[in-house]
Amino acid sequence: APSPSTDGTDGTAEPGGEGSATGEPAEPPPASEEPEGGLPAFGSEPAEAGASGELALGVAAERAARHEGFDRVVVELAGRGDPGWFVQQVDAPTRQGSGDPVQMAGEAFLVLVVRGVGYPQDTGVPEYAGPRELVPSDTEVLREVEVGGSYEGDWDASVGLAADRPYRVFSLADPPRVVLDVAHEG
């Protein structure tokens, strides 16, 4: 297994990796990669930020891993623009567009929507070809991440948790990423 490095990568060839689909541990991003103004506080209220710039983004990778004090989900993007996001707790996850239920592991659920993501024919970014289900083996509260897809400029994922826990969401650049951290303690 790759060993963590101090530059915020997980030791694999993927740029900007804060973990892996298999839950391989990784170091949190160095302070220079934290969002402007520092990391947001953990909370349980819905969180939202708008996308901006010349939006031509596509999802390149998604990964999940355990960190000291929290589990992390990273949605890495390719293309142009600054992604936005929306995250909230839900009683039961559903697919955007159809409303069909998502069957997944967990006792509590979050929906994560990345804003500013387009279709490959519009963005020039190849369609996401990674795993549709991430089941990390070493996370403390994260049980499963079910990848949805793009719909009207949004890309979604459902996140199954062992229990309700506070969370925070923010974006990083170079490459653009939306990061969801879920605290181990309530």
Image (tube, grey):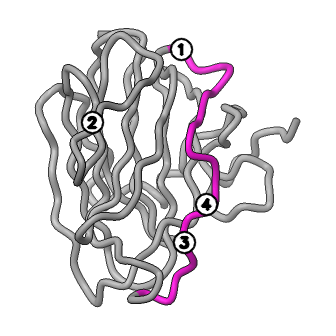
Q: Which of these two is toward me, 13 or 106?
A: 106
Q: Amino acid at mark 2?
A: Thr
Can you say whether 173 is above or below 167 in the image?
A: below
Can you say whether 57 is above or below 124 in the image?
A: above
The label number, if any, that marks residue 94 in the structure image:
2
User: Within 10 angstroms of label 1, few (less than 14), some, or many (20 or more) residues?
Assistant: some
Query: To which residue does mark 1 refer?
Result: 140
**Which segment is the magenta one?**
123-140
126 left or right, relative to 91? right
The label number, if any, that marks residue 127 in the structure image:
3
Q: Amino acid at mark 1?
A: Glu
User: Going from the N terminus, do you reach mark 4 or mark 3 first?
Assistant: 4
Can you say whether 183 is above or below 128 in the image?
A: above
User: Going from the N terminus, do you reach mark 3 or mark 1 first?
Assistant: 3
Q: Nearer the viewer, mark 3 or mark 1?
A: 3
21 left or right, relative to 169? right
